């Protein structure tokens, strides 16, 4: 029963994609502002609510949909994706496979305080995981060639 709502939202969005795209294009600025405000309010709520409370879990789900809607409104009707987005999409699997090798040492180095929200620790771990994994992929593909690097690193 918990998965019925997300399924229906996705199904509806796929059925009415053309109508939603036209609506998003015609009112892009207004929707973008509304969704951006909701995005930041949701982030503030997630930062202040108790971690596993019902409200926090519900807001987490809502935040996922707000983020998807924000991306949709920002990109609806646009041309092809930018080159960086295409590269990240192409490299997402090897980034996923290698990111823990870089995140784990950063998290071990920066002490965790139970119950404390530490955005710098989170940002440092995120930057280490994405930046170092992306660098590893770039170097491996330059040295080994794309096909061999995909075989060995994903």
Image: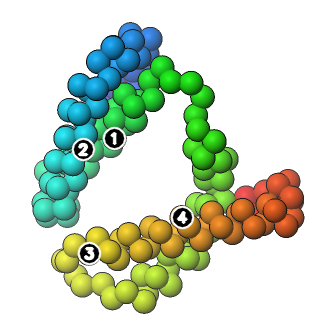
Which tag, 3 or 1, sits closer to the chain's start?
1
Which residue is the extreme one toward the front? 29
Question: Residue 39 bears which disc, if any?
Answer: 2
The reply to whether dot 3 and dot 4 touch (C-beta < 8 Å) is no
Question: Residue 67 bears which disc, if any?
Answer: 1
Colour scheme in the image? Answer: rainbow
Q: How crowded is the residue under tag 1: few (<14 C-alpha within 10 Å), some, or many (20+)?
A: some
Which tag, 3 or 2, sits closer to the chain's start?
2
Q: Secondary structure at mark 3?
A: loop
Q: Secondary structure at mark 4?
A: helix
Q: Quadrant of residue 62?
A: top left
Q: How crowded is the residue under tag 4: few (<14 C-alpha within 10 Å), some, or many (20+)?
A: some
Q: Which residue is mark 4?
A: 130
Q: Secondary structure at mark 2?
A: helix
Q: Quadrant of residue 17?
A: top left
Q: Quadrant of the N terminus?
A: top left
Q: CA distance from mark 1 to mark 2?
A: 7 Å
């Amino acid at each position: 029963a918990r998965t019925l709502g997300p399924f229906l939202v996705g199904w509806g969005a796929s059925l009415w994609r053309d109508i939603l795209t036209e609506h998003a294009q015609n009112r892009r600025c207004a929707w973008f502002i509304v969704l951006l405000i909701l995005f930041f309010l949701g982030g503030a709520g997630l930062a202040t609510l108790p971690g596993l409370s019902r409200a926090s879990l519900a807001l987490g789900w809502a935040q996922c949909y707000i983020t998807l809607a924000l991306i949709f409104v920002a990109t609806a009707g646009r041309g092809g994706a930018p080159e960086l987005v295409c590269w990240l999409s192409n490299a997402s699997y090897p980034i996923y496979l290698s990111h823990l090798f870089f995140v784990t040492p950063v998290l071990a180095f920066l002490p965790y305080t139970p119950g404390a929200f530490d955005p710098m620790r989170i940002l440092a771990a995120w930057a280490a995981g994405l930046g170092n994994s992306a660098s590893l992929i770039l170097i491996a593909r330059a040295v080994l060639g794309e096909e061999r690097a995909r075989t060995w690193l994903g």
